Every structure is written in structure tokens, then in C-alpha cells.
Image (cartoon, helix red, strand yellow):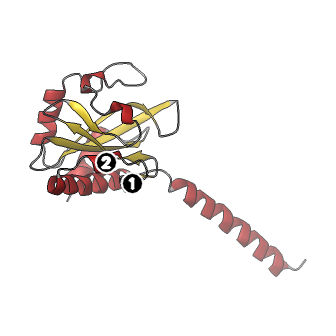
Amino acid sequence: MTSSRIFAGVTVALLSIALCTVAVGQDKATAQEVIAKVREAASALSKSGDVAQFNQKAGPWVWKDTYIFIQDCDKKVMAAHPIKPEMIGQDLTLVKDAKSGKSIYPDPGSFCEKAQASPSGIWNEYWWPKPGEKEASRKVTYHLNAKGTHYLVSAGVYDDKATIAELSKLSSKK
């Protein structure tokens, strides 16, 4: 075998590995994508008032390893959830961290007030299974009020390292 054929074979192999790595990495949503998608969804909800669009598992609000879900701050219930439809209408205080078993929203009124008062949104963290998995992972979720409504629009990233402070800085940028 000539050295040029060996070089070509090695190059093809390395490119294949690199492309596979990129493809796998693309299956994980980034914080920037979550912020952009939540803002887009909040704008759509502000205009239409239609929460049903966020219940579609195969819709535009589900991507990579995450999805948009909606909380109703007046009723303090889950208003839309594309992955776990059984949660729709559920009291927010009953939504539990999969690791600790404690409520993610022990005081939904206070949580909603804080989110609604923040024009750049807020973040919280908890343990939750990724779509299609049973084991819980650390999830950091971004919440933004849909202007003119009583809804919070939310989505999260599964990330072991990102801090709330770092994510808050990221979401405060326009």
C-alpha cells in the first residue's frame, strides 16, 4: 500500500470519528438554545394564548433532549407538558425532584411572582429523567413569563456543571 493510500485511509477514519462525535454532541440541548426557544415560545403564547400547542410530543417545542412546558401561575398547575401528559392539571407543589423527593415548587405563588418580576427570566435546578430514560439527571430549567398572560414558559438543560449564576448572566443578555 502506498503512503498516500494509508494517509487517505487514516484521514477518512479520523473524519468519520469527528463527525460521529459532533452528531452525538448535537443531541444535547445547550443553555443558549433553551433561552432562545423559551423566548420564542413565550412570544407565541403571548400572541395566541393557546397552551395546547405545547402538548405535542412531535411538535416544534420538543427538540434534542429537552422540551417546552408551561405552568399556570393563577391556578398553580402544570398547563402543558409534551412528554408527560399526565402532569397536565397537576398541582405544582406535587411535582417532585426525582432524587430528593421534595417539591420542585414548594411555594408556587412565590416562585411565579419571582419569575414574573424578572424580565430576563429565572433558573432553578432539580433532578429529572431525560426523555425516554428512567434514571434522573441534574436539570437546570429556565422560566420566563409569557407577557400579558399568567403562564410561565419553561425548558431545561441536563447539565452537571452549569451554575445558576452563570446561566442567569447568560439569560440576562439580549
Other residues around mark 2 within 10 Å, as few (<14) / some (14–19) / many (≥20): many
Q: Please, what is the three-letter code of the amino acid marked with disc 2?
A: Phe
In the displayed structure, 130 sits above or below 46; it is above
Which quadrant: the C terminus?
Answer: bottom left
Number of marks in the rendered image: 2
In the displayed structure, 50 sits above or below 92; it is below
Q: Residue furthest right?
A: 1
Element carrying mark 2:
helix
- The quadrant where residue 83 appears: top left
Distance, label 1 to label 2, CA atoms, is 8 Å
Other residues around mark 1 within 10 Å, as few (<14) / some (14–19) / many (≥20): few
In this view, the residue in front, 151 or 115, is 151
Q: Position of residue 117 (x, y in %)?
A: 9, 41
Q: Please, what is the three-letter code of the amino acid marked with disc 1?
A: Gly
Q: Which residue lies furthest to the top in this view?
A: 101
Q: Residue at x 43, y 23 (%)?
A: 99
Q: Residue at x 50, y 57 (%)?
A: 26
Q: Residue 59 carries which label?
A: 1
Q: Position of residue 30 (x, y in %)?
A: 40, 52
Q: Can residue 126 be seen in this view?
A: no
In the displayed structure, 87 sits above or below 82; it is above
Element carrying mark 1:
loop
In this view, the residue in front, 106 or 5, is 106
4 sits to left or right of 129: right
Q: Which residue is drawn at 35% across and 55% down?
A: 33
Residue carrying label 2: 54
Q: Residue at x 53, y 35 (%)?
A: 133
Q: Position of residue 120 (x, y in %)?
A: 17, 49
**Are discs 1 and 2 less than 8 Å apart at CB?**
yes
